[in-house]
Image (spheres, rainbow, N blue to C red):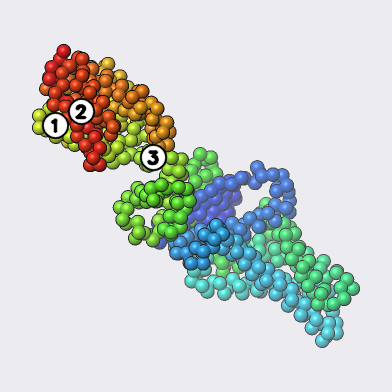
């Protein structure tokens, strides 16, 4: 477009596989269109240049640092974009062997290997070949033509050779289908930045009106490197031939000197580019002209979908740079299931349940059955991050129910945390029996003492909608969980904060309770996940574990109707003790005292009918 830019953006970019990376003053974002056609974004923050250590901001040194960082970052971003679009391939036997044998990330090693290969290829193509070419020309001129030329002429010819190789390299790579698409995304990147710099709204229509050529493209920097190298490498020619006895030796010494000067070339070129960026006149345009001309090859007209990707990356960087609280994001890539399982196992450290914890974590995150795990080939990285979070929590000893934040109890989803006891499967047997009693006797009023998470009360209300259910607990934190469970499951239960019967009003047809029944001296021997992660108040039943049974049986007469039922869950070895408390109650007479077992054959429930009050 002919109109001048209103301002210069601090945001620059790079085309990647099926996407664009944009880099601002303190953040970077890469947007890639995945196989499903959706735009994925990966963003990160970094230390702004103004806040880096002083030596990293020194002229010339900063250019070398930026050059190296840009090269490494470029390879990393391209590989990451490839993971999004192409997915992660199943690791080979060799990769698995290396990973297990040496405990290394093969992909990280391959990334660094790619950086080294790329660096070696660049040095070979643009420095080694031109160097030996010019030395061949030098030998031809001196030995065949019996004359010589000024050293600057040789360096000028070498520079021309280097530029020709560079142009030919670009032309050849542009023939590849994948590179053609990268060049189109390169055009989208330039158009987007230009649109912003012209003060236009970042819409696809406005962006498409811009040129694919941009004067701050890295191609201009590459040409500056070549121009500077022509001048700087001229000093190599002053190396006296008598330093070495062999002309061949002199050739290699000159090459080593040129390679040693590469950081200097990069540093000088960077400073020149920053200086030229401050001006826009005929002299500057002449210097930039070769780079702008080469962009005719390295950029191409993008389609609207490519422009959308570039705009997304640009706007993400704008947001991150302007808002320090804005969250960064990661690509959602495929991770092979074998790799995911291995890392989960390493995180869990020890799974005493035969890898059951790992499997339950996978099924929880993916919402699949455990039997379906063997059919998985990969998991998405977003899901895997959640799996790792769960595994790290579980590795501390925290019960899986608390890790997930809920448990399934009798077909109901019950939230749990460290303020309530996780409902046990054996409690479901108590609920089943109480449900039957309610239906058989047409009971209308039910009280659940020591309700905790509210599990018992909520199941009874769900299965008997006509019944009035009251639930009490001394812990306000526990009742907060119980109330939330009632709300989540849309069940109407009355909750009372009470130390057993203290603040409970009314009479009930049945009183059910799963009270604390662990002996004081036994609590210290419980499994760590119970001892350290579940509330002591829900476990401690006193010296002999029977304190709550005594208190409930003694005061039940004030809240239990004659003919009403008292229903307890008990410890597997407490049958005789609890039966004795009921039968020898001094305040009431109970009859039909019955003990029932769970499916494991353990004495688990006791039921008694209130016959009379003393």
> Which image quarter: residue 245?
bottom right
Viewer-side label of 2, 3: 2
> Which image quarter: residue 409?
top left
SS label for mark 2 = strand
Residue 40 visible from this viewpoint? no
Q: Nearer the viewer, residue 8 or 449?
A: 449
Q: Nearer the viewer, residue 298 or 246?
A: 246
The residue labelled by disc 2 is 567
In space, the residues marked 1 and 2 are separated at their CA atoms by: 10 Å
Spot occupied by residue 578 in the image (x, y as percentages of width and height): 24, 25
> Dot 3, how many residues are within 10 Å of its Cα: few (below 14), some (14-19), or many (20+)?
many
Q: Is residue 73 above or below residue 146?
A: above
In space, the residues marked 2 and 3 are separated at their CA atoms by: 28 Å
What numbered label is drawn on residue 462? none
Marks 1 and 2: CB-CB under 8 Å? yes
Q: Quadrant of the C terminus?
A: top left
Does residue 437 appear to the left or right of 406 in the view shown?
left
* N-terminal label among 1 and 3: 3
What numbered label is drawn on residue 437? 1
* N-terminal label among 1 and 2: 1
Q: Is residue 163 above or below residue 18?
A: below
* N-terminal label among 2 and 3: 3
Does residue 161 appear to the left or right of 6 in the view shown?
right
Spot occupied by residue 531 in the image (x, y as percentages of width and height): 41, 33
Spot occupied by residue 141 in the image (x, y as percentages of width and height): 81, 82
SS label for mark 3 = loop
> Dot 2, how many residues are within 10 Å of its Cα: few (below 14), some (14-19), or many (20+)?
many
What numbered label is drawn on residue 399? 3
Q: Measuring 13% from the left and 17% from the top, which residue is drawn there?
A: 612
SS label for mark 1 = helix
User: What residue occupies the far top of the structure in this picture?
Assistant: 614
């Amino acid at each position: 477009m002919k109109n001048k830019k209103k301002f210069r953006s601090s945001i620059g970019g790079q085309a990647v596989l099926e996407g664009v990376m944009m880099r601002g003053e303190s953040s970077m974002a890469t947007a890639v269109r995945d196989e499903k056609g959706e735009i994925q974004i990966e963003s990160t923050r970094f230390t702004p240049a103004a806040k880096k250590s002083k030596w990293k901001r020194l002229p010339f040194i900063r250019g070398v640092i930026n050059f190296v960082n840009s090269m490494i970052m470029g390879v990393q971003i391209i590989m990451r974009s490839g993971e999004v679009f192409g997915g992660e391939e199943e690791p080979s036997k060799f990769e698995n062997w290396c990973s297990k044998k040496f405990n290394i990330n093969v992909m990280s090693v391959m990334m660094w290997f790619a950086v080294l290969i790329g660096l070696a290829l660049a040095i070979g193509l643009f420095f080694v070949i031109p160097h030996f070419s010019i030395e061949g020309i030098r030998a031809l001129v001196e030995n065949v033509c019996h004359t010589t030329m000024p050293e600057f002429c040789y360096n000028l010819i070498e520079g021309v050779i280097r530029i020709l190789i560079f142009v030919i390299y670009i032309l050849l790579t542009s023939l590849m289908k994948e590179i053609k698409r990268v060049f189109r995304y390169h055009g989208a990147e330039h158009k987007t930045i230009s649109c912003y710099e012209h003060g236009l709204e970042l819409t696809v229509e406005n962006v498409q009106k811009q040129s694919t050529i941009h004067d701050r493209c890295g191609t201009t920097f590459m040409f500056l490197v070549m121009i500077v190298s022509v001048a700087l490498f001229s000093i190599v020619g002053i190396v006296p031939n008598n330093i070495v006895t062999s002309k061949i030796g002199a050739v290699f010494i000159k090459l080593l000197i040129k390679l040693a000067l590469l950081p200097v070339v990069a540093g000088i070129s960077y400073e020149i580019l920053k200086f030229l960026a401050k001006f826009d006149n005929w002299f500057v345009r002449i210097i930039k002209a070769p780079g702008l001309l080469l962009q005719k090859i390295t950029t191409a007209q993008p389609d609207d979908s490519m422009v959308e990707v570039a705009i997304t990356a640009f706007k993400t960087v704008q947001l991150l740079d302007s808002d320090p609280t804005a969250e960064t994001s990661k690509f959602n890539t495929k991770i092979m299931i074998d790799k995911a399982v291995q890392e989960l196992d390493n995180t869990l450290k020890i799974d005493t349940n035969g890898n059951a914890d790992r499997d339950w974590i996978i099924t929880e995150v993916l919402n699949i059955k455990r039997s379906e795990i063997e059919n998985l080939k990969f998991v998405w990285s977003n899901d895997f991050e959640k799996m790792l979070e769960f595994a790290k929590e579980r590795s501390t000893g925290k019960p899986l129910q608390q890790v997930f934040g809920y448990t399934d109890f009798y077909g109901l989803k019950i939230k749990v945390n460290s303020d309530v006891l996780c409902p046990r499967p054996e409690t479901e047997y108590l609920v089943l029996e109480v449900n039957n009693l309610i239906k058989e006797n047409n009971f209308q009023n039910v009280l659940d003492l020591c309700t905790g998470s509210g599990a018992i009360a909520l199941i009874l209300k769900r299965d008997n909608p006509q019944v009035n259910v009251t639930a009490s607990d001394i812990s306000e934190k526990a009742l907060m969980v119980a109330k939330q469970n009632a709300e989540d499951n849309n069940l109407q239960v009355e909750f009372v904060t009470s130390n057993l019967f203290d603040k409970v009003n009314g009479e009930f047809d049945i009183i059910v309770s799963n009270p604390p029944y662990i002996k004081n001296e036994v609590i210290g021997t419980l499994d760590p996940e119970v001892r350290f992660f579940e509330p002591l108040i829900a476990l401690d039943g006193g010296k002999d574990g029977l304190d709550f049974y005594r208190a409930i049986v003694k005061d039940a007469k004030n809240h239990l109707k004659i003919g009403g039922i008292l229903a307890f869950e008990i410890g597997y070895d407490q049958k005789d003790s609890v039966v004795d408390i009921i039968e020898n109650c001094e305040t009431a007479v109970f009859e039909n005292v019955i003990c029932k077992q769970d499916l494991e054959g353990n004495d688990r429930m006791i039921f008694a009918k209130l016959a009379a009050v003393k």
